[in-house]
Amino acid sequence: MGAGNDFRASFRVRRTAFPHHFARRLSCGEIRRSMSWLIVGLICAALGAVAFLVWRKWIAPWRQVEVVITQIGRGERPRTFLMEGSVPAQRIGFQLEKIVNELEQLQKQIAKRESGMQTIFSAMHDALLVVDSNRQVILTNQTF
C-alpha cells in the first residue's frame, strides 16, 4: 500500500503544480503588448481588404478595357464588352460596343457602295480613269 500512496501523492503534486504553471497572472505590460499585436494584425487585415477592393473596382477593369481597345484596333470584334468593376468602366464598355456596331455598319455600307460602283464601271463600254489631286490613279475600269 505504500507504493500506491506514493503514486497518489506524486499525482496530487503534479495536479496542483500543473494549474499553477499555466494560470499565472499577466502583467499590464504583457497584456498591452499582446493587445497591440492584435490591433496591428487587425489594421493590416483591414488595409489588405481595402487594397483588394480598390484593385478589383478601379485597377482591374482598366486592363480589361485596354484588351478590348487593342482587339478593336486590330479589327477584331471582342468576345464581350461587359466590364467588371466601377460604373465608369462599365459605361466605357457600353460605348465601345456602340462604336464597334456603328463601325461595322459603316464598313458594310462602304462595301455595298464599292460593289455597286464596280458593277457600274465594269458595265461601261467607255474607258474610265480617275486620278486624285496628286495625279495618282485611284480607279480604272476594265475597258481602259
Image (spheres, helix red, strand yellow):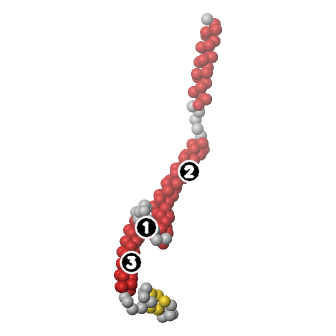
- Asked if one can make out residue 83 in the rendered structure from this viewpoint, the answer is no
From the image, state whether disc 3 or disc 2 is nearer to you. 3
Q: Which residue is mark 1?
A: 77
Q: Amino acid at mark 3?
A: Ala
Residue count near mark 2 (Cα–Cα under 10 Å), binned few <14, some 14–19, many ≥20:
few
User: Could you say whether the residue bearing mark 3 is in a helix, strand or loop?
Assistant: helix
Asked if residue 38 can be seen in this view, the reply is yes
Out of 27 and 138, give the one closest to the viewer.
Answer: 138
Q: Secondary structure at mark 1?
A: loop
- What amino acid is labelled 2 in the image? Val
Q: Which sits earlier in the primary sequence, circle 3 or circle 2?
A: 2
Q: Which mark is residue 40?
A: 2
* Gap between marks 1 and 2 measured at Cα: 49 Å
Q: Is 71 or 42 nearer to us in this picture?
A: 71
Crowd band around label 3 with a 10 angstrom C-alpha radius: few (<14), some (14–19), many (20+): few
Residue drawn at x 52%, y 54% is 48
For residue 6, what is the image quadrant?
Answer: top right
Quickly name the residue at label 3.
Answer: 111
What's the CA distance linking mark 3 and mark 2? Answer: 66 Å
Q: Residue at x 52, y 56 (%)?
A: 47
What amino acid type is highlighted by mark number 1?
Arg
Mark 1 crowdedness (10 Å alpha carbons): few <14, some 14-19, many ≥20: some
Front-most of 27 and 5? 5
**1 or 3: tag closer to the N-terminus:** 1
> What residue is rendered at 46% in x and 71% in y?
75
Residue at x 39% of width, y 92% of height? 126
Total count of labels: 3
Q: How far across and how far down the image is residue 22, in percent?
A: 59, 31
